[in-house]
Image (cartoon, grey):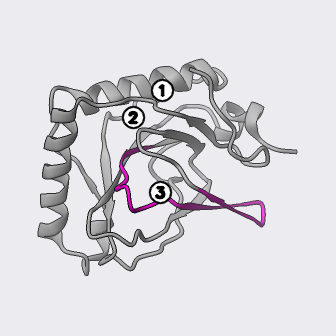
Amino acid sequence: MNPILPNKDYPILLFKNFKIPEDSIKTELVKKISEKKRFMGPSYTEALSFPIKIDYKNFLFDLYDDFVEISKKHLKKFTISDKNTKRYWAYATNRFDPHYQWHDHIRTSTINGVYYFRIPESVSGQLDFWYKDNFFRFFPEENDLLLMPNYLKHAPRQPLSDEYRISINVEIICNEDPDDIFIDYIGS
């Protein structure tokens, strides 16, 4: 599987149809993540992203391992820090979540991965990026994986659907600097 570079000036790698879950896995995980999100409520700011404590048929466990393997294959050589933990975070939002928040992952990772687990048909997966004083809008699709360095500023746009758009964040903490790891993809 080879990456697509959605914008040659941004250190972002896109893997189309990275992992396609069985229907039963998708149904169960969407149900569990949606229940957790509804319990937390849209007014609770921290509810935008939350750790996923459940897995179904080891889908998330395998997703993380596949994310590490594809990172090793397409990025410069890196070593995983002793501080790294295998974790998964859900970002679930719908039309009732008016949050549009620029952020990065500098404090939690070196390599950041965003897997688009569910994008309702009536919704786009619109994601905005900011890098070196440039703005870029991107539209990932369901089952896509984005790889990016921890410092890349991004903000998911609010979907206009009652159903949740769900992405899963996976991260690797490395001993090396992100610019050294992503050197082949840093625009001039």
Compared across the picture, whether 11 is left or right of 108 comes to right
Q: Name the amino acid type tagged 2.
A: Asn
- 32 in relation to 181, above or below: below
Determine whether label 3 and label 1 are within 8 Å by CB: no
Report helix, strand or loop for mark 3. Answer: loop
Mark 1 lies on residue: 80
The residue depicted at 53 percent of the width and 53 percent of the height is 106
Q: Earlier in the sequence, mark 3 or mark 1?
A: 1
Left or right for 38, reference 172: left
Q: Earlier in the sequence, mark 3 or mark 2?
A: 2
Amino acid residing under circle 1: Ile
Residue 16 visible in image:
yes
Residue 79 visible (yes or no): no
Q: Quadrant of residue 8?
A: top right
Mark 2 element type? loop
Q: CA distance from mark 3 to mark 2?
A: 28 Å
Calculate the distance from the C-alpha at mark 3 to the C-alpha at mark 1. Answer: 30 Å
Disc number at residue 125? 3
Q: Give the residue number, with chain letter if any, for mark 2.
A: 84
Q: Which residues are magenta?
A: 115-138
